[in-house]
């Protein structure tokens, strides 16, 4: 891979205008080694192969005695917060501790100082909570891992939380969802510094998607609430799930529950948090996801079995919910995707 990367980037030698000369990744004690690849792997590899020759990448301890662990290894982190205060780009990856635990004040002060000097600050996954605690996200849009979005909103209602996207670039402050979304954000930054062709070469060499736009949806599991079998509305929910391939007007569900449409709608919202028609559409998208993952059915047949009137209707709703087309979703999560990875 080294020869491939060196050849691919030979024309890109020289420090790109706007590229960070001092990139700092702040970690806390117990940080997992694997998270480093998402936090700075793209920049580290690009710098190693000469694409960003003037860039210095440093891992910084967010608290005394910090060590990175993984695979039976434990690596002490030698650099301190002084590097943060003079950085051009600071990245906070996934935290090992609970998001309810306030980060050390020294870290928050260092981030504010760096930001005040003009540094860009990025939070990945629950690292977004550190930026929030520093007050850098007040009144701004931000994202985090979808499972933590409600918690972020609860702790910091002043933030405009959007859990549906992979990452958000708000200029001087950036946030990303979990896992590989951090690498997507890194490639996004390199694309803005080097141009698409060089960023795409790096992505190809790393065997990752060349560009997933920040607006693409995170893949979110949507578990059903616990249903009370004695509740007539809950009973219709179970009944509808077995008949998603059929037309299910809300009036039919209300009649089955022996309720007026108005009372049925009110009780349905209490159980699920949304209107019946919205819930049915979402469940049909989930059914389509399951079929795309586990079968070789055509998109037309997936649409029919999921209760959509046509493949075009499925595509429109699917893209709205998942951020990608059914075909693209199958390429990522379908049975053939596992074969492609292992072949």
Image (cartoon, grey):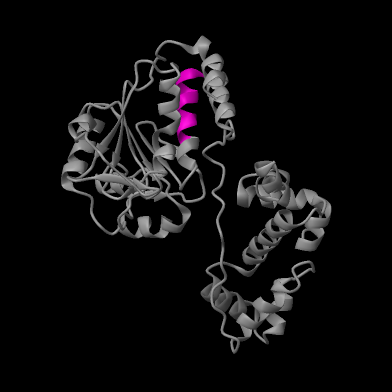
User: Overall secondary structure of the magenta stretch?
Assistant: helix
Where residue 82 appears, as percent x and y from the top left, is: 17, 31
User: In the rendered structure, does residue 194 fall within the stretch colored magenta?
Assistant: yes
Quadrant location of the C terminus in the rendered image: top right
Q: Nearer the viewer, residue 143 or 177?
A: 177
Q: Is residue 29 left or right of residue 336?
A: left
Up-down: is 308 above or below 250? Answer: above
Where residue 326 appears, as percent x and y from the top left, is: 71, 48
Q: Is residue 225 left or right of residue 241?
A: left
Q: Nearer the viewer, residue 75 or 169?
A: 75
- Magenta stretch: give its range: 185-195
Residue at position x 71%, y 83% in the image: 256
User: In the rendered structure, does residue 243 fall within the stretch colored magenta?
Assistant: no
Where residue 340 appears, as percent x and y from the top left, is: 69, 42
Q: Quadrant of residue 100?
A: bottom left
Where residue 50 appears, as percent x and y from the top left, is: 43, 16
Q: Is residue 299 visible?
A: yes
Q: Nearer the viewer, residue 56 or 34?
A: 34
Q: Quadrant of residue 297?
A: bottom right
Residue at position x 37%, y 59% in the image: 151
Quadrant location of the N terminus in the rendered image: top right
Q: Is residue 178 left or right of residue 243?
A: left
């Amino acid at each position: 891979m080294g020869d491939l990367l060196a050849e691919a980037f030979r024309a890109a030698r020289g420090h790109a205008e706007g590229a960070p000369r001092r990139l700092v990744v702040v970690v806390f004690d117990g940080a997992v080694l694997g998270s480093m690849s998402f936090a700075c792997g793209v920049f580290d590899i690009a710098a190693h192969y000469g694409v960003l020759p003037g860039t210095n990448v440093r891992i910084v301890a967010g608290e005394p005695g910090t060590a990175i662990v993984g695979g039976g290894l434990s690596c002490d982190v030698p650099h301190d917060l002084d590097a943060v205060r003079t950085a051009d780009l600071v990245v906070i990856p996934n935290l090992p501790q609970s998001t309810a635990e306030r980060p050390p004040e020294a870290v928050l002060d260092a981030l504010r100082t760096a930001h005040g000097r003009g540094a860009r600050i990025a939070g990945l996954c629950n690292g977004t909570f550190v930026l929030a605690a520093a007050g850098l996200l007040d009144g701004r849009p931000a994202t985090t891992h979808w499972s933590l979005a409600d918690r972020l909103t609860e702790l910091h209602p002043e933030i405009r939380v959007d859990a549906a996207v992979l990452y958000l670039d708000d200029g001087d402050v950036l946030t990303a969802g979990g896992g590989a979304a951090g690498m997507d954000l890194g490639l996004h930054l390199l694309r803005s510094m080097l141009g698409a062709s060089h960023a795409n070469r790096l992505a190809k060499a790393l065997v990752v998607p060349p560009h997933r736009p920040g607006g693409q949806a995170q893949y979110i599991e949507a578990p059903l609430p616990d249903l009370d079998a004695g509740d007539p509305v809950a009973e219709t929910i179970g009944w509808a799930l077995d008949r998603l391939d059929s037309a299910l007007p809300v009036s039919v569900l209300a009649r089955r529950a022996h309720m007026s449409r108005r009372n049925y709608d009110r009780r349905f919202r209490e159980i699920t948090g949304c209107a019946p028609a919205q819930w049915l559409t979402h469940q049909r998208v989930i059914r389509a996801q399951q079929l795309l993952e586990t079968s070789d059915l055509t998109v037309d047949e997936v649409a029919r079995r999921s209760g959509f009137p046509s493949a075009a209707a499925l595509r429109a709703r699917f893209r709205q919910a998942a951020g990608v087309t059914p075909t693209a979703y199958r390429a990522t999560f379908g049975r053939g995707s596992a074969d492609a990875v292992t072949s």
